[in-house]
Image (cartoon, rainbow, N blue to C red):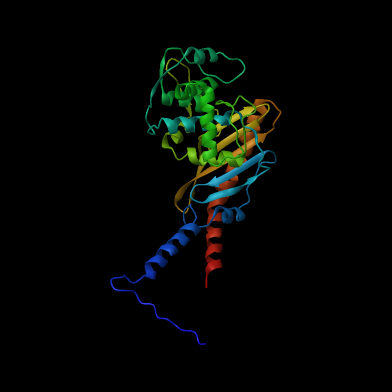
């Protein structure tokens, strides 16, 4: 028996099916799924292949360029103590809960007796804070990020969440939301050696935090003089040289020297933000030795990135164009 071919026609009043709009939608979704989230142009991996980065010989590191992407990581990405680099997350959560304009003062915060008492600590980084005095949110963030004062970090946490413990829970929730799956925060200052992370995770945080203009302005501050206090210099000794515009230092005997840095470099007429994370330099040494090692390792990495980036982007773009030429 031969097969019967039926012609199916829409009934009276039925609308004919249009496939063209559907195909357009599907095509758009496919293009969107394949598109890179960064600017058009070569990917970070393409650029990295065209560069010779001066990575640290120890610890771990990560570098990324705004609008291009990651230039890669170095070292095993296993969680290690990060010392005062912890304060990047503390500031990030505070600014998420209490947004500020880049030049704004933010909320008013009255310092408690605990913050004042902790200012005289001989075992951790602290800054003069007077009980009962009103400080602006910006002033306390500057004291915390510029001079790395632990007492300012805990004061901000109590103001925001009622207790350091409640604030730490917020930090860990934020880390999870950013995909920082190898990070655990146990305090807000970094004095706790069981606060641990990786260079790759801290890069995720740095990229998120630097999107906030207020955060960017604070970490670029060379020095701050709180009300009734003395001038406090930024602990980041690279700030203001070689294009460096931030970000945060951290050192202790268990952690060694750590530095999250931000620098700018012009590429094809566009100023690009370059972010880097260097962890675990001279771990087990004194904080001063670790800090100096992190600074030297970061400077070498920054110098190599800034020197090679413009030409690497050009070569990567040319290579990408030739590979798709017909």
- Judge by depth and name the residue closer to the eye, 134 or 248: 134
Which residue is at 64% across, 38% downward? Answer: 297
- Position of residue 191 in the picture relative to residue 91 (left or right): right
From the viewer's perspective, is residue 214 above or below residue 117? below
Residue 110's x, y, as percent?
42, 17
From the viewer's perspective, is residue 174 above or below residue 2? above
The residue lying furthest to the bottom in this view is 1
Looking at the rendered structure, the number of numbered marks drawn on it comes to: 0
Let me know if residue 299 appears in the view. Answer: no
Let me know if residue 66 appears in the view. Answer: yes
- Position of residue 195 in the picture relative to residue 265 (left or right): right
- Position of residue 10 in the picture relative to residue 6 (left or right): left
Residue 118's x, y, as percent?
54, 15
- Judge by depth and name the residue closer to the eye, 247 or 133: 133
The residue lying furthest to the right in this view is 284
- Judge by depth and name the residue closer to the eye, 233 or 105: 105
Residue 325's x, y, as percent?
52, 70
Which residue is at 47% across, 61% downward? Answer: 30
Q: Quadrant of residue 253?
A: top right
Q: Quadrant of residue 107?
A: top left
Which residue is at 59% across, 34% downward? Answer: 259
The residue lying furthest to the left in this view is 13
Q: Quadrant of residue 133?
A: top left
From the viewer's perspective, is residue 32 above or below residue 232? below
- Position of residue 293 in the picture relative to residue 326 (left or right): right
The residue lying furthest to the front in this view is 1
């Amino acid at each position: 028996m031969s097969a019967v071919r039926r012609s199916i026609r829409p009934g009276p009043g039925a609308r004919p099916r249009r496939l063209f709009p559907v195909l357009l939608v599907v095509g758009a979704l496919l293009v969107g799924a394949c598109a890179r989230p960064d600017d058009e142009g070569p990917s970070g991996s393409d650029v990295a292949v065209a560069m010779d980065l001066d990575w640290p010989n120890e610890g771990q590191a990560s570098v990324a360029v705004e609008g291009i992407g990651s230039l890669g990581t170095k070292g095993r990405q296993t969680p290690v103590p990060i010392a005062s680099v912890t304060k990047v997350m503390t500031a990030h959560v505070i600014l998420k809960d209490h947004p500020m304009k880049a030049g704004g003062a933010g909320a008013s915060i009255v310092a408690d007796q605990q913050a004042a008492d902790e200012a005289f600590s001989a075992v951790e980084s602290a800054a003069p804070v007077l009980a009962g005095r009103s400080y602006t949110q910006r002033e306390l963030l500057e004291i915390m990020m510029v001079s790395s004062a632990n007492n300012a970090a805990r004061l901000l946490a109590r103001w925001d969440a009622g207790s350091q413990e409640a604030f730490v829970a917020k930090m860990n929730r934020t880390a999870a939301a950013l995909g920082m799956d190898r990070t655990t925060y146990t305090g807000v200052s970094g004095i706790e050696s069981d606060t641990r992370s990786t260079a790759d995770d801290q890069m995720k945080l740095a990229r998120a935090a630097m999107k906030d203009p207020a955060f960017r302005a604070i970490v670029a501050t060379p020095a701050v003089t709180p009300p009734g206090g003395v001038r406090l210099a930024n602990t980041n000794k690279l700030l203001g040289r070689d294009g460096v515009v931030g970000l945060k230092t951290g050192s202790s005997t268990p952690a060694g020297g750590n530095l999250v840095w931000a620098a700018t470099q012009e590429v094809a007429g566009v100023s690009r933000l370059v972010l880097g994370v260097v962890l675990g330099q001279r771990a087990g040494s004194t904080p001063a030795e670790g800090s100096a090692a992190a600074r030297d390792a970061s400077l070498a990495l920054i110098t190599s990135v800034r020197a090679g980036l413009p030409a690497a982007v050009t070569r990567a773009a040319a290579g990408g164009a030739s590979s798709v030429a017909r």
